Image (cartoon, rainbow, N blue to C red):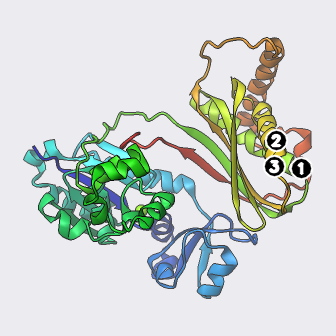
Amino acid sequence: MERNILHSDLNAFYASVEMMLDQTLQGKAVAVCGSTEERHGIVLAKSQLAKKAGIKTGMVNWEARQKCPGLILVPPHYDQYLKYSKLTRGIYQRFTDQVEPYGMDECWLDVTGSTELFGSAMDIAENIRKTVREELGLTVSIGVSYNKVFAKLGSDMKKPDAITEVPSHKMEELVWPLPSSELFYCGRATTKKLATYGIHTIGDIANTPPDLLKRRLGVNGLMLWNFANGNDASPVMHRDFVSPIKSIGHGITCVSDLAHEEEVWRVMLQLTQDIGHKLRLHGLEATGVQITIKDHTLHDKQYQAPLEVPTQLPMELARKARELFHKNYHWSGHVRSITVRAINLIPHGQPQQLNLYIDQQKRERKMVIEDTVEDIRCRFGKRAIYPATLLGDLKFPGTLSHEITMPGMMGRG
Ligand SMILES: [Mg+2]
């Protein structure tokens, strides 16, 4: 039996929440920026009008202001986004308990078992669209289809505040003309590669012999072929499904470029304070560290390595990050931004092989100290206690970017 899958996407989510909370922003070109002052603040989200004026996510503030002189910059309010994300999910859950979030503003819903009670999939989509609008003052666009991939494509076809149905008999008409880059998991590198074989649209992918795609792109190619042909049986996860966190990253763009390793080290130490905190919060330990360095030309370089022992300790994460930097970065230019990421996470406190070269007692003492630090911060605030190296000018902007990456639920997962 064909399933009824919805993909619901909150339109211009951050900007819409800001405008809903502050009526004076309505009908204006608004951009939510990581930082509204510093020269490196970038656009995180934009309103419909700002989009029309050519504002793009990731644009630097001054660039955005140049493009759209009347643009209003507002700082993000993540607590509000989280709140409205949850409230929206609450609405979805009135119709089905199979609600799988994908980021803060998107969800898949499997409503196959709900049609008896609530009407057709299209009826349910319409009901959701209206309810979200009336109760929360936000708009969604919804794709309705028989699999997750096409439902996601559908939610992108008409927006804001709209519903698009992608039934199986309309696959060739609606899906196949789209550029291959629109297909789930078809990233920039894959899109480029496909183009060199003359494959430009989703239809091209669908009509290429699967063997050929497999030879060129491996299993990934086979998966894309299946997606393009509507063969996607991946289930919508139950709402109680807690997806294990894959990595915890923390990055900043500095207000002025970093010129030597000492500065880089202090930034890394700062970043790992928060990563350590989050690892504790989630009861996880990192078994590896990854760093992404952007130099003044905005070129990205990424390096990663395993840790000697799994850890939550900021100092151990920072040391590994510094080691990676020292080994790999050749100061072709000043450093503009740094992201440190704790990767390959495992549950905290798992039995582990003891490493003879590491003083385990010393580590345990450090962990007790970290526990105390954590406790002090909980009671007196985040800035109550700090490593001495972190005093002074760190070239930090007012805000940092936080990132918790969840594993994809589809395809290879
Ligand atoms: Mg959205």
Look at label 3 and name its amino acid. Answer: Val
- Circle 3 residues within 10 Å: few <14, some 14–19, many ≥20: many
Tell me which label, 3 or 2, sits earlier in the chain.
3
The answer to whether residue 102 shows anywhere in this view is no
In whole angstroms, how far apart are the C-alphas of marks 1 and 3?
Answer: 10 Å
The image position of residue 7, as x and y in percent, is 29, 55
User: Residue at 44% of width from left, 35% of height from top?
Assistant: 243
93 vs 154, nearest the viewer: 154
Q: Which residue is mark 3?
A: 267
What residue is shown with label 1?
261
Q: Is residue 400 above or below residue 387?
A: below
Left or right: residue 164 compared with residue 213: left
Pick the front one: 38 or 25? 38
**Image marks 2 and 1: residues in contact by CB distance under 8 Å:** yes
Amino acid carrying label 2: it is Arg
Residue lying at the far bottom of the rendered structure:
69
Q: Is residue 90 above or below residue 70?
A: above
- Which disc, if any, is residue 322? 2
